[in-house]
Image (cartoon, rainbow, N blue to C red):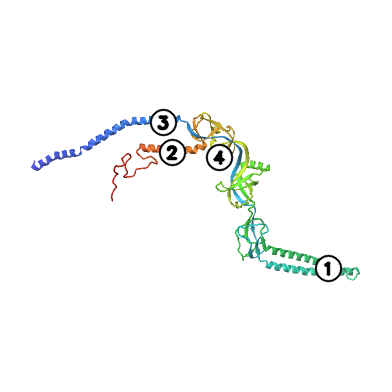
Amino acid sequence: MDPIERKQAADVPQSQKSWLRRWWPVPAIAVLALLTAATWRLTQPAAGSAATADKSSRNGNAGDRPTPVVAEAATVQPVFDVTLGALGTVTARNTVTLHTRVDGELVKVAFREGQIVRVGELLAVIDPRPYQVALDNALATLEKDKAQLANAEVDLDRYRGLIADDSIPKQQYDSQVALVQQDKAIVQADQAQVENARLNLSFTQVASPINGRVGLRQVDLGNQVHASDANGLVIITQVQPIDVVFPIPQDQLPKVQRRLASGVQMQVDAFDSDGRTLLGSGTLLTTDNQIDTTTGTVKLKAEFGNKDGILFPNQFVNVRLHLENIADALTVPSAAVQRGAPGLYAYVVKPDKTVQIRTLKLGASEGDRVQVLTGLSAGEQVVVDGVDKLRDGASVDVAQAGAAGAGAVRSQSTSASTAGAAGKAKGAPAAGAPTREAGAAPAGASASAPAAPHATP
């Protein structure tokens, strides 16, 4: 072996020793991590068991607490007004499309759009001159034929004297009698022509046939109008009084018919689209003569005075029909009534702060209250909120219905406090607590302690 090979063989162990000195902390750190993981694994089940036991303890204590509920007393209402709601449509009592009876030029419009008009009030004028000429011509013809009739009657009187003396043939006398009758018929025909011409002349004055409100004008001044025009001059709707048509379920029809048959006037109220503003009150007039098979409803018509003109034709309104008034009715909130295996029932709060399931027999309902026929007494408390977790005989913590809103506020405050405490436990600021800005002194630090220096640009 030459000197160079011996030098290379001597350098190999030296390089291995240098590598060991450089990388020996790596296996040491790996062994330390394994030991730490094994220690955490061995201690974790014990901590988990303790947490489970603590949770079970809290659940056990919660199970013994009374269930919070909201209750309201059953009350006796002196007058329980039972109504039936529906969506109705306002309809005009009468609707007229005003047409002319004669043809001609529209020379005058005597109404304002939207004006309230009365029967016989002048609305428009058609050029009357052609019809005045026709009347004058008919009068002239009548006078001419009257003169001919008078002459024929004079001749008849003369022939009557001559026939008595046997001076003329009887045929001539009979012909004169026929001529007089013919002239009388002509005069009657002329009189009819005069009346027809006078009637056409009167048709040039277009008057309102009903009381009502006129709409928008369909024809402008100066246009030629005809009796056959489809749109007419204007549309008039009678709005005082006005009607409202609305459907009710067919099951409610017998009650309505009995009330109508007894002669009782049933009140009907009309409200706006949100159901809060009263537009007017009226009385029920009648029912339709058949039931709509597609909807199972029957239409009713009510009459409203509409003195202030709030109700408008084709307007949609919320209708409330007053069916009956029940005296001294025992009622409870509808939220208290439950449906289940016992049928209709409610949770009644007993004096010992436990609840009892009580089956009920209900009557009419109105709004958020329902009449109780049997099963409750006046003054008994029924649960209206919090029934989901109740059972017969469960202990409850009762809050009155009026205090439910305040309880909700207190619950929100308690939740906020709990969230704040949890935040402090985790080192985070509580909900609603002021946060410390960057550079501010930490809590508990002296006011004279220097703040962190600001970064300079």
Task: Name the amino acid, label 2.
Answer: Ser
Task: Name the amino acid, label 3.
Answer: Arg
Tag 1 secondary structure: helix
Which of the marked residues, 2 or 4, is nearer the chain's N terminus? Answer: 4
The residue sitting at the left extreme is 2
Q: Determine contact: label 1, label 4, CB under 8 Å.
A: no
Which of the marked residues, 4 or 3, is nearer the chain's N terminus? Answer: 3
Task: Name the amino acid, label 4.
Answer: Asp
> For residue 230, which quarter of the picture?
bottom right
Q: For mark 2, what is the residue?
A: 413
Which of the marked residues, 1 or 4, is nearer the chain's N terminus? Answer: 1
Q: Which mark is residue 58?
A: 3
Tag 4 secondary structure: loop
Determine the CA span between mark 1 and mark 4: 92 Å
Which of the marked residues, 3 or 1, is nearer the chain's N terminus? Answer: 3
x 81%, y 65%: residue = 181
Q: Which mark is residue 227?
A: none
Determine the CA span between mark 2 and mark 1: 116 Å
Determine the CA span between mark 3 and mark 1: 129 Å
Task: Name the amino acid, label 1.
Answer: Glu
162 or 131, nearer to the observer: 131
Q: For mark 4, what is the residue?
A: 368
